[in-house]
């Protein structure tokens, strides 16, 4: 699955891990995150994430 990086703080959302602190289960694709989900490190919204290429 595609990873996404926060353009504000460089947090990487990894679908294999999810965001357990926000109740997002492992295996949840970025596109399937709730619209009101925000970066757990800096708080910006999904619109401030871009596809991450390793």
Image (tube, rainbow, N blue to C red):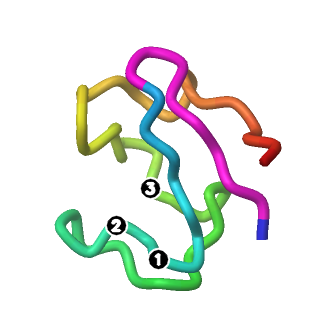
Coordinates of residue 35 in the picture (x, y in percent): 46, 45
Left/right placement of residue 53 relative to residue 24 reads: right
How many numbered discs? Answer: 3
| Numbered badge on residue 54 | none
Question: Residue 52, located in which quarter of the rendered image?
Answer: top right
Instruction: Decide whether residue 17 is among the magenta residues.
Output: no
C-alpha separation, residue under disc 3 versus residue under disc 2: 12 Å
Q: Which residue is mark 1?
A: 17
- Label 1 crowding class (10 Å Cα cut-off): few <14, some 14-19, many 20+? few
Coordinates of residue 25 in the picture (x, y in percent): 40, 83
Q: Which residues fall within the magenta stretch? A: 2-9
Question: Residue 2, located in which quarter of the rendered image?
Answer: bottom right
User: What secondary structure is found at the residue carrying circle 2?
Assistant: loop
Quadrant of the snapshot with the N terminus? bottom right
Q: Which residue is mark 2?
A: 19
User: What secondary structure is found at the residue carrying circle 3?
Assistant: loop
| Numbered badge on residue 34 | 3
C-alpha separation, residue under disc 3 versus residue under disc 1: 16 Å
Coordinates of residue 12 in the picture (x, y in percent): 51, 46
């Amino acid at each position: 699955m595609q990873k996404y990086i926060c353009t504000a703080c460089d947090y990487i959302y990894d679908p294999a891990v999810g965001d357990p602190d926000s109740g997002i289960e492992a295996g949840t694709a970025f596109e399937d995150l709730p619209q009101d989900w925000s970066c757990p490190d800096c708080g910006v919204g999904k619109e401030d994430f871009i596809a991450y290429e390793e």
